[in-house]
Amino acid sequence: MTVMEQRGAYRPTPPPAWQPRTDPAPLLPDAEPYRVLGTEAAAQADPELLRRLYAQLVRGRRYNVQATALTKQGRLAVYPSSTGQEACEVAAALALQERDWLFPSYRDTLAVVARGVDPVQALTLLRGDWHTGYDPYEHRVAPLSTPLATQLPHAVGLAHAARLKGDDVVALAMVGDGGTSEGDFHEALNFAAVWQAPVVFLVQNNGFAISVPLAKQTAAPSLAHKAVGYGMPGRLVDGNDAAAVHEVLADAVRHAREGGGPTLVEAVTYRIEAHTNADDATRYRGDAEVETWRDHDPIQLLERELTERGLLDEDAKSAARDAAEAMAADLRARMNQDATLDPMDLFSHVYAEPTPQLREQRDLLRAELEAEQEGAH
Amino acid sequence: MTTVALKPATMAQALTRALRDAMAADPSVHVLGEDVGTLGGVFRVTDGLAAEFGEDRCTDTPLAEAGILGTAVGMAMYGLRPVVEMQFDAFAYPAFEQLISHVARMRNRTRGRMPLPITVRVPYGGGIGGVEHHSDSSEAYYMATPGLHVVTPATVADAYGLLRAAIASDDPVVVLEPKRLYWSKDSWNPEEPQSVEPIGRAAVRRPGRSATLITYGPSVPVCLEAAEAARAEGWDLEVVDLRSLVPFDDETVCASVRRTGRAVVVHESGSFGGPGGEIAARVTERCFHHLEAPVLRVAGFDIPYPPPMLERHHLPGVDRILDAVARLQWEAEN
């Protein structure tokens, strides 16, 4: 006899006013990740959009390869590669309108670049020469967030503020599978649902939070299921299927813009490289697993679809490759230039006006620098 | 010259007035927090704001401090001026990551492109018989975080002026409201409330010649009482109310100590790693040759905030302050 059966005699009286506020059924994600490529749904996809996605995927992959190489040359302090996850990154940027906002996490440099931020500026944090190298207002991209999930409530607040001002702006906030365990994830989703804020949460479930696999991260049937408890729809999508990710995100963005409130999208993908160049992935996963995901590569999936449907010929492919190569060459050349930093900037932006205490410290540093200069002569 | 009708007003009323005036003057000012709307806050500081300005401007949020401050960050990014209420000092701790990792450093991180004009109101300190987690003095944590301004009023007029200044600031300001002074009254003209000097200026509340009591917030009235009591002993104590912990007004504090030659720092917060150590060190570094005695600290004990029945033993009172003043008649041991 189970404990529940022993307690079978107990029949709680429902509290008088209780009734479910929402029917959870329409909020529940599908059992299988949604796919477009290789299915009949692909026929509905806009060929022009698919070609744009393809060019961006090729460019994104090249960017990942180039940035990883730059870490080996000591030009980047660290680079968390998104190789294998390019479809999520690219679709995230392309699902937004110009007036919308993107809230990236530290692995989302590609989404930032796809949004229009200069490739070198997007690496400023990871290069170590200052923190945010780009103006967040120029392309409406928040700074890359290193603490996990803490940027999600920012997205909610910004979207809420935009709505209060009467602007139909949507915020897209990106987080990893590990980030869904953080308290800020919970608080952000709850606020967004209560306020019906125009936010889309994109979880890139790439299988691991550094070394900890998803099974040790959550007991939920899927991360998309987490949406239901907050009263928002959860959507599960194949994160390597660029067309599917774009379609689901674009739907969620449209839904938010029309006043429908937030959506949680889980994109199932895989991190082909280690967490960063400082990580040894062989300690927690086998080559065989990585190989199965290489066979489900986002670029190959899209390329196969486009080629079979006669939407991509050799010229188009080589044009995409050439554009990516030119971007990489430019990135390499500019990253190989030494950054010029002014130490006095350390005090420039702590407050609108430096405090008297900071002014004293600024004078100390200036004197030290002058002494260094004199010593050099 | 117009005659100003002074009426007794409480600090809580002055804070309410400050919020109302700020919201009326600037439509981008939004108040948010737990219970700030219909209830008007557990201390009634936001009383009437939701009715006057609507629930979009004075918003009851879900009960989640990190969420309250985190969403305020996004609101500030979009051009609003959020004023956040953390219901009690110790309830603010879940929001510390947002405060330290984002609020305090967004301006610096973005090289000035994304300043965050957020005001964080924190009712703090003991003496109201609150149970655990309702009486902490958390100022040292805020002071230790670069990028934040930290102010704490001790008078009704300052409560109004400092809160208005905080809301007007383009930088994040933590306003520590001494909750046991919420009901303290003063003659104040609510029809013509005055602004204060820019954030960062201390005020000499009582001039004196024998020694300086350096204090702030809830300890200011205690120090003034101690100064009155000290007259019987022949001591003429000066009382400096810091008003702003960050930036720190070295100028006013050191001018006072150079005049008196002796100083005691008084606060409720614990002594070890507390604000008094920083203040004593600053005074010593700047006034060493003027000092007749070491700078002393009268602070709360280095214990978790005690239960209400014992808090009177913990809080610095007049006698403990006078004992310290007596020790200032210091003579070097050989």
Image: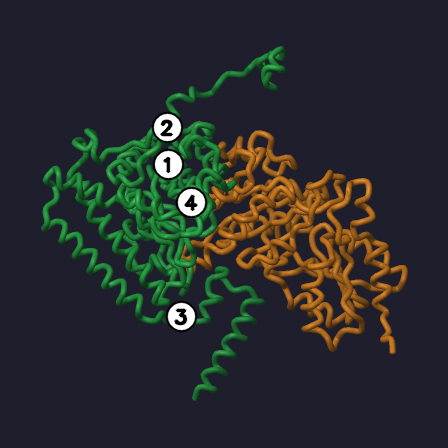
The residue carrying mark 4 is A208
Q: Is residue A165 left or right of residue B278?
A: left
Residue at disc 4, secondary structure: strand
Q: Colour of chain B?
A: orange
Pair 3/4: label in front = 4
In 3D space, how far apart are the residues under numbered discs 3 and 4 (Cα atoms)? 36 Å
User: In terms of sequence position, does the residue under pointer 3 or pointer 4 come before the other?
Assistant: 4
In 3D space, how far apart are the residues under numbered discs 4 and 2 (Cα atoms)? 21 Å
The residue carrying mark 2 is A29
* The chain in green: A
User: In terms of sequence position, does the residue under pointer 4 or pointer 1 come before the other?
Assistant: 4
Q: Are marks 3 and 4 in contact (CB under 8 Å)?
A: no
Q: Is residue B224 among the parts visible in the rendering?
A: yes
Q: How is the image coloured?
A: by chain
Q: What's the chain of the residue with tag 4?
A: A
Q: Is residue B145 left or right of residue B310?
A: left
Check disc 3 and give the amino acid type.
Answer: Leu
Which of the two residues, B119 or A282, is positioned nearer the viewer here? A282
User: In terms of sequence position, does the residue under pointer 4 or pointer 2 come before the other?
Assistant: 2
